[in-house]
Amino acid sequence: MLSGFFLKSFRILLLPFALLFWLGIAIRSWLYNKNILKTSSFGLPLIGVGNLSAGGTGKSPMVEYLIRLLKNEYQIATLSRGYMRKTKGYALANENTTALDIGDEPMQFHLKFPDISVAVGEQRIEAIPQLLHDRPGTQCIILDDVLQHRAIKAGLNILLTDYNNLFTRDFYLPTGDLRDLKSNYKLAEIIIVTKCKLDLSVGEKLKIIREIKPLPSQKIFFTSIEYGQPYHLLSKAVKEISAETEVLLVTGIANPRPLKKKMEAISKEYHLMQFGDHHIFSVDDLNEMKTKLAALPSSDKVILTTEKDGVRLFKFGDELNSLPIYVLPIAHRFLFDEGAAFDNIILQFVKNFNKTTD
């Protein structure tokens, strides 16, 4: 609690830099709005998933949700920037690809959905034609982390904002977490308030909608986090985390708070090893995990991490076979029985786009 207070105090001291950052993104946004900086579109349905803040809103689970929704009817591809990878330029995932080649989130999509095309490229205006050249049958592309990269215009943009840190209540980096103008929420066709409590009331829902002030054309949905069954990183064997299980929780994600709350609810006790977002694990990190796990007194003990972290541990290969190292999958759960309405918007967008271009 004390460290959090000092962190907030330090970030307030960075207010002059936040104002300069705001000025920079305001000028850039104005240039796009005036068409001085150009935006390009493509002749196939592009669905953008993004946020206005620096991570932690649930983009990867939303991309996975869209993949599951569309992949049985259409040839799907995902295109990401490949943040924190060790390569540059366009790359299309194959059987030899690692997280160092394309980044952790695209690697997660590639491992979970090997039947779809997963590509990365910093310059999406160049990457999309290359992707379509390599996969000419592609019928829909899901753009991961798109709102700040306006050189490409998606036909349908989905904006995610964390219930615990709504963009309306946030401030600009580095004082706050915003990396884009608050007013750019108007660029999205759909707004999703993520990581809500399961018992969110209708009254609170309406209060948040009034606070966001959506345009008449915008739709707002609310989701909570739904955790799946933990499975072993290599063998995929499932594990029941009970009140007797002692957990070494390893995280390298932007916002581990919901995960920590989950551990408090289901495990006997958990111990945290927290790294920075997109941390690249070293041999020393792995050895420290082994040491800390061995020191836990319980006979029922596991290392638990996220799927995004798991793909960055995958490189240690067979060395993980002897470790009880499990990953905890997450998904979006739509509240107020509105999942079908969201699905219908997505399906109709892709269907009608393809119909008009036939």
Image: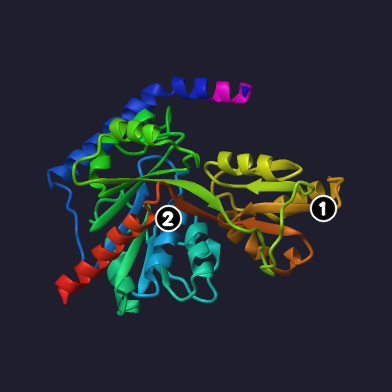
User: Residue 140, image x and y in percent?
Assistant: 30, 69
Tell me the CA gap for discs 2 and 1: 33 Å
Q: Is 343 positioned to the left or the right of 239 in the image?
A: left
Q: Is residue 323 above or below residue 216?
A: below
Could you say which quadrant of the image residue 169 lies in? top left
User: Residue 14, image x and y in percent?
Assistant: 43, 24
User: Residue 296, image x and y in percent?
Assistant: 83, 45
Residue in the picture at 85% in, 46% down: 295
Q: Main secondary structure of the magenta part?
A: helix
Mark 2: give few (<14), some (14-19) or many (20+) Cα within 10 Å.
many
Could you say which quadrant of the image residue 143 lies in? bottom left
Residue in the picture at 37% in, 31% down: 172
Res. 319 visible in picture: yes
Q: Of the residues shown, which amino acid type is indicated by label 1?
A: Asp
Image quarter of the C terminus: bottom left
Secondary structure type for disc 1: loop
Residue in the picture at 37% in, 32% down: 203
Q: Which residues are magenta?
A: 2-7
Q: Is residue 358 above or below residue 10?
A: below
Residue in the picture at 57% in, 21% down: 6
Residue 63 lies in the magenta stretch = no
Which residue is denoted by mark 2 in the rendering?
A: 62
Residue 6 lies in the magenta stretch = yes
Seen from the viewer's position, the closer of residues 222 and 212 is: 222
Res. 281 visible in picture: no
Which residue is denoted by mark 1 in the rendering?
A: 300
Image quarter of the N terminus: top right
Seen from the viewer's position, the closer of residues 152 and 215 is: 215
What label sits on residue 201 in the rendered view? none
Q: Is residue 6 above or below residue 170?
A: above
Q: Of the residues shown, which amino acid type is indicated by label 2?
A: Met
How many dots with numbers? 2
